[in-house]
């Protein structure tokens, strides 16, 4: 004969259906806030705290992380970059020793540099839903530039 013993701890306040609703919303809109999710559950007649929402999302493998800032790339930029990479895929090492690599970054002086948060898994940090596109123009900033090659830095 099987006997069910009392379970330790309090029962979950969020039903499996409510958990699925939360996960669906976060998957579609990773920038949604815990308060938005609390309000959604309240409309479904389930009262929970923001901490309960955090625990549920963590139990499903999601963390609250800073959205990565990435350059705003149009599809044409992506295609041109891929074409360049494919065109030079088989270049000998001596060719690559002649290449100088450069990059630049913009540091904003007077803007509000607040961090947007997203709910995501570690491997999804550069998924377009989890990033903030940036542009390299506007006022009140400094642009730093640097380069390097096989011979050293520039």
Image (cartoon, grey):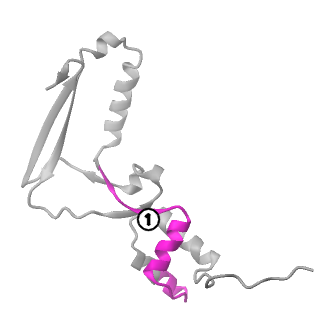
What residue does disc 1 label? 29
Name the residue: 58% across, 73% down. 19
Q: What is the x, y in percent for residue 123?
A: 47, 49
Say above or below: 25 vs 128.
Answer: below
Q: What is the x, y in percent for residue 75?
A: 35, 41
Name the residue: 9% across, 52% down. 141
Q: In which quarter of the image is residue 34?
A: bottom left
Residue 34 seen in render:
yes
Say above or below: 38 vs 124.
Answer: below
Query: For residue 21: magenta?
Result: no
Say above or below: 98 vs 122.
Answer: above
Query: For residue 67: magenta?
Result: yes
Q: In which quarter of the image is the N terminus?
A: bottom right
Residue 24 seen in render:
no
Residue stretch rendered in magenta on the structure: 40-69
Q: Quadrant of residue 63?
A: bottom left
Name the residue: 9% across, 56% down. 109
Check disc 1: other Cα within 10 Å, few if <14, some if 14-19, many if 20+.
Answer: some
């Amino acid at each position: 004969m099987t006997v069910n013993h009392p379970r330790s701890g309090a029962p979950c306040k969020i039903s499996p259906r409510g958990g699925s609703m939360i996960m669906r919303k976060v998957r579609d809109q990773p920038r949604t806030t815990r308060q938005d999710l609390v309000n959604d559950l309240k409309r479904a007649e389930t009262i929970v705290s923001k901490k309960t929402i955090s625990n549920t999302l963590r139990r499903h493998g999601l963390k609250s992380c800073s959205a990565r800032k990435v350059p705003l790339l149009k599809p044409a930029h992506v295609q041109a970059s891929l074409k360049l990479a494919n065109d030079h895929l088989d270049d000998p090492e001596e060719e690559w020793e002649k290449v100088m690599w450069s990059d630049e970054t913009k540091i904003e002086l007077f803007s509000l540099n607040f961090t947007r948060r997203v709910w995501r898994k570690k491997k999804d940090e550069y998924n377009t839903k989890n990033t903030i596109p940036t542009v390299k123009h506007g006022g009140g900033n400094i642009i730093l530039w640097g380069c390097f090659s096989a011979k050293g830095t520039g």
